[in-house]
Image: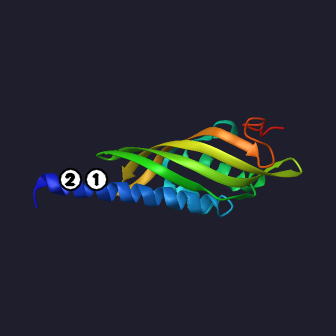
Amino acid sequence: MNDELLARIQRLEDIEAIRHLKARYCLACDDNYNPEALAPLFAEDAIWDGGILGYNEGRSAIKAFFSQSSAMVPWALHYVTNPIIEVDNDMATGNWLLWEPMTFAMGETKTGCWHCASYSDEYVKVNGEWLFKKVKINIEVLSPYNNNFGEVPVIDPQA
């Protein structure tokens, strides 16, 4: 097999491995933000940036954040679509769209919400395994299900 064909096959395998990484992330989030499943998906110096939902640097900080996340979001179902994944050797980027019905807890009140966002991810290949280097969530809608998006496009999680 020639080098060009081998490189093309490797690129396709890398893209598929990144898709699986994102799928494992979503499954762990939907499992009460399981910190034991989520933490190993991130590089040691990774960043998780959820905007108004939180910002965490380093695998241990990300794990600690997710260990408390189910108090803020007791239920969620992540649907990610439309991936655009670009691989450059042992680095990659990915853009995804997120549709997430969820329950958002604000104090004692639990509110059903629609969450629409995009992910801007960075990945790094460490010892042959793809990991998140950065997860950035760009929130477009975080709105109570009984309102229209025009009335309350993004709720205040501190309220």
The picture places residue 100, in percent across and down from the top left corner, at 65, 53
What residue lies at 77% left-to-right and 38% top-to-bottom? 155
> On residue 71, which mark appears?
none
Amino acid type, residue under disc 1 in the picture: Arg
Residue 62 in view, yes or no: yes
| Viewer-proximal residue among 146 and 126 | 146
3D distance between C-alphas at marks 2 and 1: 6 Å
User: Tag 2, which secondary structure?
Assistant: helix
Q: Are marks 2 and 1 in contact (CB under 8 Å)?
A: yes
User: In the drawing, does residue 47 fall left or right of residue 115?
Assistant: left
The picture places residue 34, in percent across and down from the top left corner, at 64, 61
Quarter of the image containing the C terminus?
top right
Q: Residues within 10 Å of mark 2 (few under 14, many from 20)?
A: few
Amino acid type, residue under disc 2 in the picture: Ala
Above-or-below relation of 41 to 133 = below
User: In the drawing, does residue 13 fall left or right of residue 63?
Assistant: left
| Viewer-proximal residue among 91 and 116 | 116
The picture places residue 68, in percent across and down from the top left corner, at 72, 53
User: In the drawing, does residue 156 fall left or right of residue 56?
Assistant: right
The picture places residue 132, in percent across and down from the top left corner, at 47, 49
What residue lies at 63% left-to-right and 38% top-to-bottom? 140
Quarter of the image containing the N terminus?
bottom left
What residue lies at 51% left-to-right and 60% top-to-bottom? 23
Residue that carries the numbered disc 1 in the rendered image: 11
Residue 54 in view, yes or no: no
Residue that carries the numbered disc 2 in the rendered image: 7
Above-or-below relation of 124 to 52 = below
Q: Residues within 10 Å of mark 1 (few under 14, many from 20)?
A: some
Give the image quarter of residue 86: top left
